[in-house]
Amino acid sequence: MSAVKIFRYLFLFLAAAIIFNCIESCKQKSRQPQQAKDINELIRTEIEKYTYPLPSAFEASEMLKEIEAGYLADITNQPQKAETYFTEESKALNLGIYISDLAYATTYNKRQDIRKYFEACETLVRELDFASAFAPGLANRIEENFDNKDQLVEIITEMFQNAYAYLNRQGRSGLSYLVLCGTNIEGLYLTTHISENTFQNIKIIEAILFQKEPLTELQKMMESKKDTELLKKTCRDIKQINEIYAQEPGNTSLTEKQVTELTGVVTKIRNNYINRQ
């Protein structure tokens, strides 16, 4: 079982345990079943509202590793560029990009790159003023678990789950959407650039198709904010990608034309993001 699936099951188990314990605590204070039911519903709503809503950044990179695609360090965003982003928009988008790069490096157990991409993420989180979303000693926990991939995946996934929840609780959902956009754009960029013969590899096509649904869901999530100054350009980018996916109905195939178009459009969008200041 992959580390991503293990963490997903663990998260669901912990969420269920939290709900169960809260309900039991309420029952001790009051025997009214309606009160327990109301609290159960409240907790369920809170979990759904603030849970990272799309597949983990690890899932796409895990698929690449499973098909024995080699690790290519030169296709990721340069970690040192983290300090060159000045607007909220560019910081949030590139935080999302570095999340995917961090997941990619972690999947392949590249210690030096894990450290560099974590530091890049840390820089942008600090610049965006939500470092308090991360637990103290997080860097040490990552260092201590370099030899335990499953634990490292859990720590990093929890880290960005907390960041997503924190931004939304603070009323900064626009930034959280930009982070999600950056993560998904980079995941698709890595997938379409992992091989020179993308269309000839059915497993890579499956990995590209896997990212269709999250991008469709992301467009729906952003719909209510598509005309805001912060998100309007990014919303157009996601829509453009989804229109290419939609040329072929269903989730089972892509034409060579679609793969070529996706690769070109994603490359243009992603390069615009990483070079934006």
Image: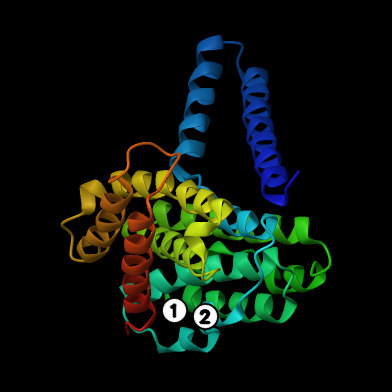
**Place of residue 73 in the rendered image (x, y in percent of width and height, measured from the top left):** 60, 79
Asked if the residue under mark 2 is in contact with the one under mark 1, i.e. CB atoms within 8 Å, the reply is yes
Residue positioned 75% across, 68% down in the render: 141
Front one among 96 and 249:
249
Question: Is 211 situated above or below 264?
Answer: above
Looking at the rendered image, the quarter that the C terminus falls into is bottom left
Q: Is residue 175 visible?
A: no
Give the residue type that dot 1 points to.
Glu
**Place of residue 63 in the rendered image (x, y in percent of width and height, measured from the top left):** 62, 54
Q: Which residue is mark 1?
A: 127
Q: Is residue 210 visible?
A: yes
**Place of residue 208 in the rendered image (x, y in percent of width and height, measured from the top left):** 47, 53
Front one among 35 and 118:
118
Q: Which residue is mark 2?
A: 123
Q: Name which quarter of the figure residue 115 lies in.
A: bottom right
Residue positioned 38% across, 65% down in the render: 263
Question: Is 116 situated above or below 194?
Answer: below
Q: CA distance from mark 1 to mark 2?
A: 6 Å
In the displayed structure image, the side of residue 195 where residue 17 appears, left or right: right
In this rendering, the count of numbered labels is: 2
Give the residue type that dot 2 points to.
Thr
- Residue 137 is labelled as none
In the displayed structure image, the side of residue 123 where residue 108 appears, left or right: right
**Place of residue 212 in the rendered image (x, y in percent of width and height, measured from the top left):** 41, 47
